[in-house]
C-alpha cells in the first residue's frame, strides 16, 4: 500500500531574502517545488500539498528563550541596520532583515505541522522543505539558523509520550539539536557530517556521546574532506542504520541537507545522488513514521534534485535521471548552463581518499565501542540489514 505523504510548502517563501551576496538562497525551495511538479509528483493519489503555517510562540518557548524571541521580533519590524551579537544577530552569517521573525516562524511552523500530521493524523511521511535549521541555539542564531525547528517539533512529540530518533546527513554537524537533547535517552541524535576539525561549527566529534541519562544517545560520525559515496554509505550502514533499527523510535526525524554533494561551493565532501538516495531508501524501509526537513545546500540545482529525489523515494517513485524539459527551461532562464545538471566529477586523489577511509574506520571503531553497548545492549540485537 502506498505511503500517505504530505509536502509542506508556502508561496510566502518568495517574500524573503538573506541578501544578494549571502550564500543561502530561498530560491532553492521554489526550484525544488517546481522540479517535483515537473516530474508529476504532486498529483500522486496519496499525496497532500499543505500550506506552511507560522509557528506559535507557545511552541517556540519549549526551547527558545523569551528575551531572544523578543529581540527577533523587534529586529524583524525595522528596515534599519541592526545587530546584537549576544544573540548572534546581524553578522555575515545571520543578517537582520525586515520580516526575519516571520520567515523563521514559517520554517519552524512547517516542521511542527509535519510532526503533527505524523503524530496525530496518521501520515506515514511529512516533508517540510523549509526546515532543517539545526544550528540555532536556545538564545542565539548561528549558521543561517534563527529558530531550531527540529528541536521545537521534537519537543512536541515528546509531550505526546513518543520516543524520537533524529538523523542529520547535512555536511554540517547538527549542533543545536544535539545540545537540546544531550542529557536525555528519549531522543537518539545521529549526525554524519564533515569534521569539525576544520569546518563549521567546530563540533560533532566521536567523544560527544551525551551526559547523564543521555550518555550514549548522542552519536557523531565526522568525515574528513573527500569522503565519497562509498564512505558515506559505510558510515550509514555500519553505524546509523543499526542504531536506528535497534532504538526503533516511535517517530524518525531526518535533516536532509544536500550540501554534502560534490558541487556544493561551501563543503569538501564527494557525495552524489547515488548515496543520498540509497540512504533514503533504507530509511523508508524501516517503516517508522517519518518527519523530514530540508537543511543546507548551496548549489541550487542540485538541492532541487536532491529533495525531489527524496520526495520520489518517500512516495515509492523512481525518477529518471533526465530532468524534465519544463524544468530545464526554468533554470535556463535563471542562467544555469546544462553542465550544471549533473554531479561534478572531481574525484579525490588516492592519498586523500585513503585518509578519508582511515578516518571513517577509526570513527566507526570508537562508536562501536562506546555507543553500541548502550543502544543495542538496551534495545536488542539487530542485524543492520
Image (cartoon, rainbow, N blue to C red):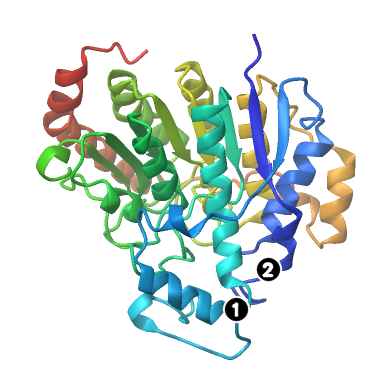
Q: Position of residue 70 (x, y in %)?
A: 44, 75
Q: What's the mark number on residue 97? A: 1
Residue at 42%, 30% (x, y): give it. Answer: 252
- Of residue 326 and residue 101, the one placed in the foreground of this image is 101
Residue at 27%, 53% (x, y): give it. Answer: 179
**Depicted 76 relative to depicted 251: above or below:** below
Dot 1 lies on which element?
A: loop
Q: Position of residue 159 (x, y in %)?
A: 35, 38
Residue occupying the far bottom of the picture: 80
**Depicted 79 relative to depicted 112: above or below:** below
Q: Position of residue 296 (x, y in %)?
A: 52, 54
Q: What's the mark number on residue 16? A: 2
Residue at 35%, 62% (x, y): give it. Answer: 137
* Left or right: 368 in relation to 84: left
Residue 284 in sight: yes
- Of residue 63 and residue 29, the one placed in the foreground of this image is 63
- Tell me if mark 2 has few (under 14), some (14-19) or many (20+) residues whose alpha carbon lies within 10 angstroms of its own: some
Q: Position of residue 55 (x, y in %)?
A: 54, 54
Picture quarter with the N terminus: top right
- Tell me if mark 1 has few (under 14), some (14-19) or many (20+) residues whose alpha carbon lies within 10 angstroms of its own: many
Q: Quadrant of residue 365?
A: top left
* Left or right: 201 in relation to 292: left
Amino acid at each position: 500500500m502506498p505511503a500517505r505523504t504530505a509536502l509542506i510548502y508556502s508561496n510566502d517563501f518568495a517574500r524573503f531574502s538573506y541578501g544578494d551576496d549571502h550564500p543561502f538562497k530561498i530560491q532553492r525551495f521554489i526550484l525544488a517545488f517546481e522540479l517535483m511538479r515537473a516530474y508529476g509528483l504532486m498529483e500522486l493519489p496519496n499525496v497532500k500539498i499543505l500550506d506552511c503555517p507560522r509557528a506559535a510562540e507557545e511552541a517556540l518557548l519549549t526551547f527558545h528563550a523569551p528575551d531572544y524571541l523578543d529581540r527577533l521580533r523587534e529586529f524583524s519590524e525595522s528596515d534599519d541596520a541592526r545587530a546584537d551579537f549576544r544573540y548572534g544577530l546581524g553578522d555575515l552569517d545571520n543578517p537582520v532583515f525586515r520580516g526575519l521573525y516571520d520567515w523563521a516562524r514559517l520554517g519552524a511552523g512547517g516542521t511542527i505541522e509535519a510532526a503533527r500530521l505524523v503524530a496525530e493524523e496518521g501520515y506515514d511521511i511529512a516533508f517540510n522543505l523549509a526546515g532543517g535549521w539545526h544550528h540555532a541555539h536556545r538564545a542565539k542564531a548561528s549558521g543561517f539558523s534563527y529558530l531550531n525547528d527540529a528541536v521545537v517539533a521534537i519537543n512536541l512529540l515528546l509531550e505526546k509520550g513518543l520516543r524520537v530518533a533524529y538523523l542529520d546527513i547535512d555536511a554540517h554537524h547538527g549542533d543545536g539539536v544535539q545540545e537540546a537533547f544531550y542529557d536525555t535517552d528519549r531522543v537518539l541524535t545521529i549526525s554524519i557530517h564533515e569534521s569539525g576539525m576544520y569546518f563549521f561549527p567546530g563540533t560533532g566529534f566521536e567523544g560527544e556521546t551525551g551526559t547523564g541519562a543521555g550518555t550514549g544517545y548522542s552519536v557523531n560520525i565526522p568525515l574528513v574532506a573527500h569522503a565519497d559515496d562509498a564512505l558515506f554509505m559505510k558510515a550509514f550502514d555500519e553505524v546509523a542504520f543499526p542504531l536506528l533499527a535497534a532504538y526503533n523510535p516511535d517517530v524518525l526525524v531526518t535533516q536532509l541537507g544536500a550540501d554534502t554533494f560534490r558541487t556544493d561551493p561551501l563543503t569538501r565532501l564527494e557525495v552524489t545522488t547515488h548515496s543520498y538516495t540509497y540512504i533514503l531508501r533504507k530509511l523508508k524501509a524501516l517503516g517508522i513514521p517519518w518527519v523530514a526537513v530540508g537543511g543546507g545546500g548551496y548549489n541550487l540545482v542540485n538541492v532541487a534534485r536532491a529533495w525531489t529525489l527524496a520526495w520520489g523515494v518517500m512516495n515509492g517513485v523512481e525518477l529518471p535521471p533526465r530532468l524534465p524539459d519544463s524544468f530545464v527551461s526554468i533554470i535556463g532562464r535563471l542562467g544555469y548552463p546544462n553542465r550544471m545538471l549533473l554531479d561534478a566529477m572531481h574525484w579525490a586523489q588516492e592519498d586523500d581518499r585513503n585518509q578519508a577511509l582511515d578516518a571513517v574506520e577509526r570513527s566507526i571503531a570508537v562508536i562501536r565501542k562506546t555507543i553500541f553497548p548502550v543502544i543495542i545492549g538496551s534495545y536488542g540485537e539487530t542485524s543492520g540489514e
